Amino acid sequence: MGTISLGCAGPCYVLTLIGRGTIREGRTISECVSRADLDGMRTLLLDLSEVDYLDSTCLGTLVALHQRFNRGATPRFTVADSAVHLKKLIGATKLDTLLPRVDEAPSTTDHHEIPTEIMDGPTLAAFVIDCHRKLAETGGSDSASFMLVAEMLAREGRPPATK
């Protein structure tokens, strides 16, 4: 299990993930970002320098953040990590070539830990499906596999057809 903390460095929110990034951490990061005041002047940096594993839901969370905050000319979502470590962590998905990166996170103020949340069944299923769809949208070599997982999970979650 990983730990997540939040701090500020001027107009930048800095989320730091330490350890493992699984569904709990991915969902917590998504919820934290959705509640944060990320108006046009604020940016978000996710420090991955002390992460040793990211599952597909955390990878999908990275894609969702990139899609949400990096549409304009100036990226507002960046990851902090060395190029070598990031390639080991997410290189198989080619996300290391997609996401803007800096070598290290800035010093922060008001740093506090954010508790991870347990999700109910329907929320969990929707989150997993969405993360896999986001990964499929990247066009990487595993895109078809990620879409297949999303489609299978979506089918399993539907109520049975009535005759």
Image (tube, rainbow, N blue to C red):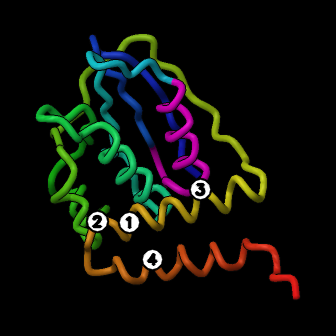
Q: Who comes first in sequence, dot 3 or dot 4? A: 3
Left/right placement of residue 74 relative to residue 94 reads: left
Q: What residue did someone put label 2 on?
A: 138
Please give the range of residues in magenta: 18-35
Q: Nearer the viewer, residue 14 or 139?
A: 139
Q: Secondary structure at mark 3?
A: helix
Is 89 rendered above or below residue 136?
A: above
The percent position of residue 143, horizontal first and vertical second, equals 34, 77
Q: What residue did someone put label 3 on?
A: 127
- Circle 4 packing at 10 Å, graded few (<14), some (14-19), many (20+), is many
Q: Amino acid at mark 4?
A: Met
- Circle 2 packing at 10 Å, graded few (<14), some (14-19), many (20+), is some
Q: Main secondary structure of the magenta part?
A: helix
Residue 20 inside the magenta-drawn segment = yes
Q: For the point 88% across and 88% down, which residue is it?
A: 163
Q: Secondary structure at mark 2?
A: loop
Q: Report, in whole angstroms, how far the alpha carbon at label 2 lies from the one at label 4.
A: 11 Å
Residues at marks 2 and 3 touching, judged by CB atoms closer than 8 Å? no
The percent position of residue 77, horizontal first and vertical second, equals 27, 36
Q: Report, in whole angstroms, how far the alpha carbon at label 1 lies from the one at label 3.
A: 12 Å
Q: Amino acid at mark 1?
A: Leu
Q: Secondary structure at mark 4?
A: helix
